[in-house]
Image (cartoon, rainbow, N blue to C red):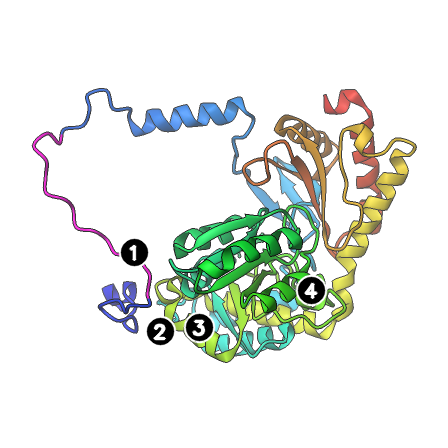
Amino acid sequence: MGSTSRRAPPAPASKPADDPAPQPQSAPPPQPQSAPPAAAETLDAIAARKLRALDGRRLRRHLIVTERRGAAAARRNGRDLISFSCNDYLGLAHHPAVVEAAIEATRRYGAGAGASRLVTGNHPLYEELERRLADLKGAEAAVVFGSGYLANTGTIAALVGAQDLILTDELSHSCIAAGAALSRARVLAFRHNDAEAAGGLLERYRGEHRHCLIVTEGVFSMDGDLAPLPELARLAARHAAWLMTDDAHALGVVGGGRGSKHAHGETIDVPLQMGTLSKAVGAYGGYVCASTKVAEWLRNRARTLVYSTGLPPGVVAAASAALRLIDARPELATEPVRRAALFVDTLVDRLRPMTPERSGAALPRSVRSAIVPLVVGSAERALTLAEALERRGFLVVAIRPPTVPSGTARLRFAFSAEHDEDDVLRLAEAVAQCLTSRGAVG
Ligand SMILES: Cc1ncc(COP(=O)(O)O)c(C=O)c1O
């Protein structure tokens, strides 16, 4: 395809009025004094200064080579560890049927897609994947994107524009915020999981805008709690707004594996269900489930689909194989949540009569997903605890700002159907020891 693969022919050369994408501006004519200021800091100096600032606040990140041997096993720095840091909630990334599907499709169709889906990258495997996603989520149609991040940014920016309003939970994922910023809509955040606060904002501001999108995570990635979808859906209906869920951590785990729309014991109208194929599905890619018409709109207007190369065929085949397993074995979805609850119950029991709070840490009161946060406050303390657990053979990642609000650094435990119950019990014991022995956590 040469250079044509970098441009998507279906997109019109001149942008239609309903396409809000910013266009590159031509450079202004050169000014008489265009030399840089003499004392301009070099790029390297800026990078070094910013990295030092991160070091000083214990907020610098490092990429650490980690070999994954399954959902629950990892090898890092020459040591085998039991991992509680992976979103492969059902252990499907290493499932023989999933791996085999990837190999077979790669042999047949090649390693890469070669172009955008709208050019020649729409290989035959997408049809099955999108059908399976739509059926599982109870939607008319699905659109698969290159990743969850691309699904959120592309969808939000395609659906709303400068005259519109976006209401989002204050803890929503970074790619929801990125999509909202790209859309140029007015963006208002409501207090975490507070439907009443969202209702107040709608009363006050909805009338000033053409369309309104309410977007939240179905299961919160760093807190593990569920959004109040029945209340948000009622608000959406009352205020003529569209409700969108990000089910990245819900698919395969809650609602019998079908996601957050199905996890509240009542029928909820969620016209836009976004998610990822990279967590419980064990592969890679993102999707949005919607009506047939909205899906077609996204295929035409979501820039991250139109102007980005399609997924590798092996990845699409792997995702379909994993969805087949999720569909055939709905009981699998209960396994990660059962282990998460076992961990919390055991830890609370082990710490008695002390509460987790008295040990300087907070655990969720109820467990409804595969994610358990142990909020410890400072980045320093979270890192020290993670290091202490690693010495005991457990890989648990410290989550620090800006991923979570300042003062709420935490350990984030992710449970998988692959975890041995004995390992969950040993983890609870190790965490209890770290929290109670001053020496272990500093
Ligand atoms: C809530 C949420 N949304 C979206 C994403 C992005 O998905 P992906 O990793 O497929 O880009 C993530 C992944 O980290 C996530 O946690």
Whether residue 392 is visible, yes or no, is yes
In the displayed structure, does residue 35 sit left or right of residue 261?
A: left
Q: Position of residue 10 (x, y in %)?
A: 30, 74
Q: From the viewer's perspective, is the residue at label 1 or at label 4 nearer?
A: 4
Amino acid type at circle 2 is Thr
Question: Mark 1: which secondary structure?
Answer: loop
Q: CA distance from mark 2 to mark 4?
A: 41 Å
Q: From the viewer's perspective, is the residue at label 2 or at label 3 nearer?
A: 2
Whether residue 122 is visible, yes or no, is no
Question: Mark 3: which secondary structure?
Answer: helix
| Tag 1 residue | 22
View quadrant of ligand 1? bottom right
Question: Mark 4: which secondary structure?
Answer: helix
Please provide the residue range marked out in magenta: 19-34
Frontmost residue, 144 versus 402: 402
Q: Position of residue 283 (x, y in %)?
A: 57, 61
Q: Earlier in the sequence, mark 2 or mark 4?
A: 2
Amino acid type at circle 1 is Pro
Amino acid type at circle 3 is Tyr
Q: Earlier in the sequence, mark 1 or mark 2?
A: 1
Q: From the viewer's perspective, is the residue at label 1 or at label 2 nearer?
A: 1
Amino acid type at circle 4 is Pro
| Residue farthest along the left direction in this orientation | 32
Q: Earlier in the sequence, mark 1 or mark 4?
A: 1
**Magenta stretch contains residue 418:** no
Q: CA distance from mark 3 to mark 4?
A: 43 Å
Q: CA distance from mark 1 to mark 4?
A: 36 Å
